[in-house]
Image (cartoon, rainbow, N blue to C red):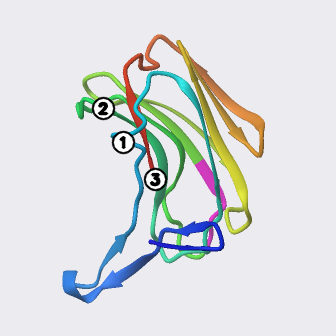
Amino acid sequence: MVVADGVLNLETYRDPRYGMRWVSGGVSSGPGLRQTYGKYEIRVRMQAGEGVAFAALLWPVREVWPPEIDFAENGGETGVRRTVTATLHYGRVDHQVQRTIRIDFTRWHALGDEWLPGALIYTIDGRQWAAVRSRAVPAQPMELDL
């Protein structure tokens, strides 16, 4: 991780100490910020990539999975960053409700999630692009992880 000019860079690289596996930095709001419901937004851009995934998500404080709310995730298509997926994971066998949109992640975007009782509202650059309304939306303390 490197901070310069007010920008946090989470860097990913192949590490010879780990057999040239990809390693990356990450950040979490826990234990300082753990809450039930709220509005979360990150401003992000990525290099085109070499197959490295990223995720912005809400993770359960009690460390029992699922649930999990991924509000911005990209699987790392080699050489492109053209989609973002939002996934609600729930239930004992990891049921999923997914939404996907095409977007160029090599440019800056604000990605957000408004988490309400029974609803998730996903945003890009302040505009709603998808929503999930379900009893499966978690109602327990979670933390933000990148």
**Marks 2 and 1, how far apart at CA:** 8 Å
Residue 42 relative to residue 58: left or right: right
Does 81 appear in magenta? yes
Front residue of 51/33: it is 33
- The picture places residue 58, in percent across and down from the top left corner, at 44, 37
The residue singled out by tag 1 in the image is: 30
Image vertical order of residue 89 relative to residue 1, above or below: above
Q: Quadrant of residue 44?
A: bottom right
Q: Quadrant of residue 62?
A: top left
Image vertical order of residue 65 relative to residue 54, above or below: above
- The picture places residue 49, in percent across and down from the top left corner, at 54, 75
The residue singled out by tag 2 in the image is: 61
The magenta segment: 80-84
| Mark identifier at residue 146 | 3
- For disc 2, the neighbor class at 10 Å (few under 14, some 14 to 19, many from 20) is some
Report the residue at 48% width, 59% height from top: 54
Image vertical order of residue 81 relative to residue 92, above or below: below
Q: Earlier in the sequence, mark 3 or mark 2?
A: 2
**Marks 3 and 2, how far apart at CA:** 15 Å
